[in-house]
Image (cartoon, helix red, strand yellow):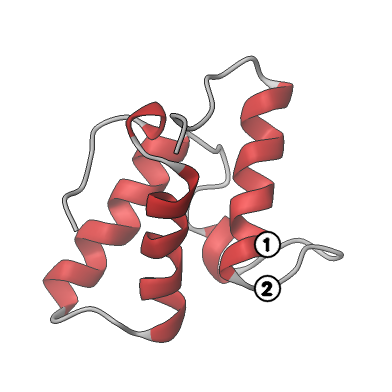
Amino acid sequence: MELKNKLEEYTEHEFLTLLIAIFDGKYSSEEEHDAIVNNIISTSEHPKGTDIIYYPEDGIEDSPQGVLKTIKDWRAKNGKPGFKPE
């Protein structure tokens, strides 16, 4: 999958696919893993960085869907744009 520069360039499904790849280990190399993680963190702009993936807060589902919800909620609360329409 092509990595994009801004979250609003992704559809929600495309971004979820990136999260699933990380959770399920579906990447071809450590370089690809790092590129995907760095892209998720940079495009989400979430202040907790990789912790939202690897160390979710109590009460947050430890899954791709839980990370997606965390990012969406934080972006909405902080006036950031969401995903592009499907």
Residue corresponding to mark 2: 62
Q: What residue type is labelled 1?
A: Gly
How far across and how far down the image is residue 46, in percent?
54, 38
Give whichever of 10, 57 is nearer the camera: 10
User: Is residue 59 or residue 15 the one in the foreground?
Assistant: 15
Query: On screen, 75 above or below 53?
Result: above
In the rendered image, the vertical position of residue 58 relative to residue 84, given as above or below: below
**Which secondary structure lies at badge 1?**
helix
User: Measured from the top left, where is residue 14 in percent x and y?
Assistant: 37, 52
Residue drawn at (86%, 64%) of the image: 59
Instruction: Confirm or deny contact between disc 2 and disc 1 (CB under 8 A).
Output: yes
Q: Which residue is drawn at 68% across and 48% down?
A: 70
Which residue in the structure is indicated by mark 1? 66
**Residue sitting at x 24%, y 71%:** 33
Other residues around mark 1 within 10 Å, as few (<14) / some (14–19) / many (≥20): some
- Image quadrant where one finds the C terminus: top left
Disc ID at residue 31: none
Q: In this view, does 63 lie above or below 13?
A: below
Residue 81: x, y in percent? 52, 20
**How dense is the environment of label 2, judged by Cα within 10 Å: few (below 14), some, or many (20 and up)?**
some
The answer to whether 43 appears left or right of 72 in the picture is left
Query: Is label 2 in a helix, a strand or a loop?
Result: loop
Quarter containing the N terminus: bottom left
Q: In which quarter of the image is residue 66?
A: bottom right
Q: What x and y, as percent, mark residue 61?
A: 75, 69
